[in-house]
Amino acid sequence: MLDLLPQFLLNGIIYGALLAVPAVGFSAMFSVLRFPNFSVASQATVGAFAGYAANVWLGWPILLAVVAAFLVSAVIGVIVDEVALRPLRKHGALTTAIASIAGVVVLENVVRFIFGNDMRGYDLPLVRDLRFWDLRIGPQQINNLLIALGIMAVIFAVLRFTRIGKAMRAVADNPGLAELKGIDSIQIGRLAVFFGMGIVGTGGLLLGLGNSIDPMLGFRFFLPIFAAAVVGGLGSTPGAVLGAMVVGIGEEASLLLLSPAYKSAVGFLFIVIVLSFRPRGILGERAY
């Protein structure tokens, strides 16, 4: 059994990199808006199906499908936030978070109405897996990994070097002080939702590329996404990446001992263990 460990670790690193994309989006929105937006589950589904429509219906290559997934998820995320969530923020984080769960149900059923309940796959060429040493990896897995790394590099560059990124970090650190400095926190909140939901939708597409997709895709992946953000430290972008790697490798390595049916429970286990010793998460600066 232990001879399979290197293969599971490789699978875990790739899965963790893909998981990091939506986890970064979720964590970035939390840092600015100060509530957990659970509608990321449905936005991941929206992104996966927007990419499917671009790839299969329109015949676009995967890279353009990634752009379509980002834009459609970002726009729908802003609409949902403006119509349903922003008016509720004055009533507190818990009320807004509960409303975001209602958004999950609505969006998933909209996707189900348009695309139906059937499982679908992207239009990808069939190619043989690559083998080196005793490991096996698919060319599409390599492409997905490179796309995920490219997206995360862009995210870090935007947050670190652009005025928008610096304004988002200022609002995340201290909204009142940011307002005194002339930063419009409402506008920054809209930008956080736009970029955050776009990233989540792109992550949904990447997670769906290796498998089939259906309207429950986002719901299935929400727990590992949430676990990655919490374990790494809510509000911390590097923490979301680290948490995603911990959860991704942990879930894949658990297959050495557990049935795949228990794989999703590993995320909960990491949440309990990490928060028991460090309530703010591994790289989080604030406890919630």
Image (cartoon, grey):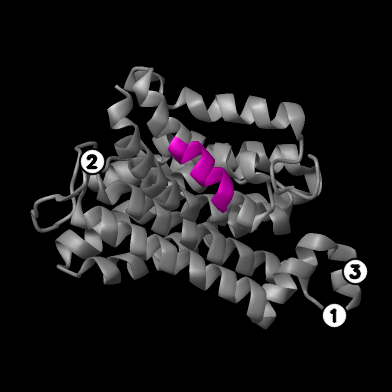
Q: Nearer the viewer, mark 3 or mark 1?
A: 3
Q: Earlier in the sequence, mark 2 or mark 3?
A: 2
Amino acid of disc 3 = Leu
Residue placed most toward the observer, 182 or 276: 276
Is label 3 in a helix, a strand or a loop? helix
Q: Is any atom of residue 174 visible in this view?
A: yes
Which numbered disc, 2 or 1, marks the residue closer to the eye? 1
Residue 159 % position (x, y): 63, 71
Say the numbered circle drawn on residue 182: 1
The answer to if 243 sits in the magenta stretch is: yes
Q: Which mark is residue 193?
A: none
Stretch of the chain drawn in magenta: 241-249
x, y percent for residue 82: 61, 59
Task: Name the amino acid type tagged 2.
Answer: Gly
Q: Quadrant of residue 134?
A: top left
Left or right: 53 as drawn, with respect to 271: left
Going by the numbered disc 1, the residue's amino acid type is Gly
Q: CA distance from mark 2 to mark 3?
A: 48 Å
Side of 196 where 183 appears, left or right: right
Residue at position x 10%, y 58% in the image: 125
Vertical position of residue 110 compared to residue 171: above or below: above
Image quadrant where residue 218 sits: top left
Read off the residue under disc 2: 116
Secondary structure under tag 2 reads loop
Give the residue number, with chain letter if any, for mark 3: 177
Residue 238 location (% of width, % of height): 62, 56
Q: CA distance from mark 2 to mark 1?
A: 47 Å
Looking at the picture, tell me which residue is in the foreground, 111 or 70: 70
